[in-house]
């Protein structure tokens, strides 16, 4: 069973009131999703609709709707008498998400070896290097996400990018834990550059192998992170 934590007092440091001139629902969803994926809201943390509404300056209805969308992504759960809380990390679900992500991203790079990559990929890689130089792991993660999104969008297909973002949600919190080791950032950037070079060279075999190795690396640290952050993970078999 997960450890339940009441840490809503920290919410004002994480969330800001929404813009009343814009639709509330998307703003609330993006804010809560971001806080969960960044591990600002940790696994097991209880999320009170009333408290969130107060901090965000919104009624409970759009907050409830945002939490429903987060449940669909597997990022929160609601239990009778316990309320809504951030779901623990689940090793089995992480492996499933990685399997699906690998299938999509390998297909993307194979397709891209027959196409042209946009110049925005080069700008992204330079920005990654700048983030590493500043030891800014959160900016690097955002640029990492953008790199993979740029590859998906460059295929000219709409659905892969959408599905990729949905499945990647199960991996993002694990990535936050792993990226706290600054040495890992440089390795990831080198892999991104190698993937880009293979695509531009039209080398489908190398592009496939490099992308597979790149995506599987997160599984190499899964057991270690689960041991070091056991309170964040489910215990025993997947329910």
Image (spheres, rainbow, N blue to C red):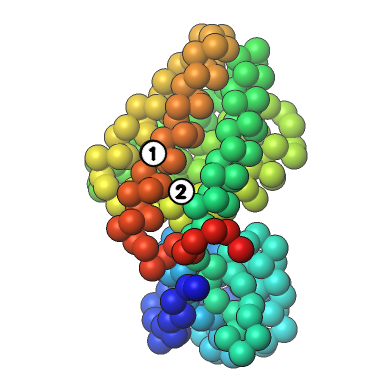
| x 62%, y 18%: residue | 110
Q: CA distance from mark 2 to mark 1?
A: 21 Å
Mark 2, other Cα within 10 Å: few <14 / some 14–19 / many ≥20: few
| x 65%, y 50%: residue | 166
| Rendered location of residue 69, percent (x, y) | 69, 66
**Circle on res. 220:** 1
Q: Nearer the viewer, residue 111 or 205?
A: 205
Q: Nearer the viewer, residue 37 or 125?
A: 37
Residue 31 appears in the picture as rendered: no
Above or below 49: residue 105: above
Mark 2 residue element: helix
| x 48%, y 73%: residue | 2
Above or below 159: residue 103: above
Please tell me whether mark 2 or mark 1 is closer to you in this view.
1
| Rendered location of residue 99, percent (x, y) | 59, 38
Quarter-wise, where is residue 159 in the image?
top right
| Rendered location of residue 151, percent (x, y) | 58, 30
Residue 75 appears in the picture as rendered: yes
Q: Nearer the viewer, residue 161 or 42?
A: 42
Q: Which residue is mark 2?
A: 142
Viewed as shown, does residue 121 lie left or right of 130?
right
Mark 1 residue element: helix
């Amino acid at each position: 069973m997960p450890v339940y934590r009441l840490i809503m007092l920290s919410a004002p440091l994480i969330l800001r009131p929404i813009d009343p001139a814009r639709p509330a629902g998307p703003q609330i969803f993006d804010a809560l999703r971001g806080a969960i994926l960044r591990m600002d809201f940790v696994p097991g943390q209880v999320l009170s609709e009333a408290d969130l509404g107060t901090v965000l300056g919104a009624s409970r209805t759009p907050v409830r709707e945002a939490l429903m969308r987060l449940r669909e992504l597997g990022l929160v759960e609601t239990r009778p008498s316990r309320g809504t809380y951030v779901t623990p990390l689940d090793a089995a679900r992480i492996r499933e998400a990685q399997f699906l992500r690998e299938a999509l991203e390998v297909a993307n790079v194979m397709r891209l070896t027959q196409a042209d990559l946009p110049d925005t990929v080069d700008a992204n890689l330079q920005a990654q290097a700048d983030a590493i130089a500043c030891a800014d792991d959160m900016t690097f993660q955002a640029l990492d996400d953008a790199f993979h999104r740029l590859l998906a969008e460059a295929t000219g297909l709409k659905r892969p990018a959408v599905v990729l973002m949905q499945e990647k949600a199960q991996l993002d919190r694990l990535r936050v834990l792993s990226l706290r080791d600054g040495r890992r950032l440089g390795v990831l950037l080198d892999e991104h550059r190698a993937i880009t070079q293979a695509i531009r060279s039209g080398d489908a075999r190398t592009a496939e192998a490099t992308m597979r190795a790149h995506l599987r690396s997160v599984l190499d640290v899964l057991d270690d992170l689960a041991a070091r952050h056991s309170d964040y993970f489910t215990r025993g078999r997947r329910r």
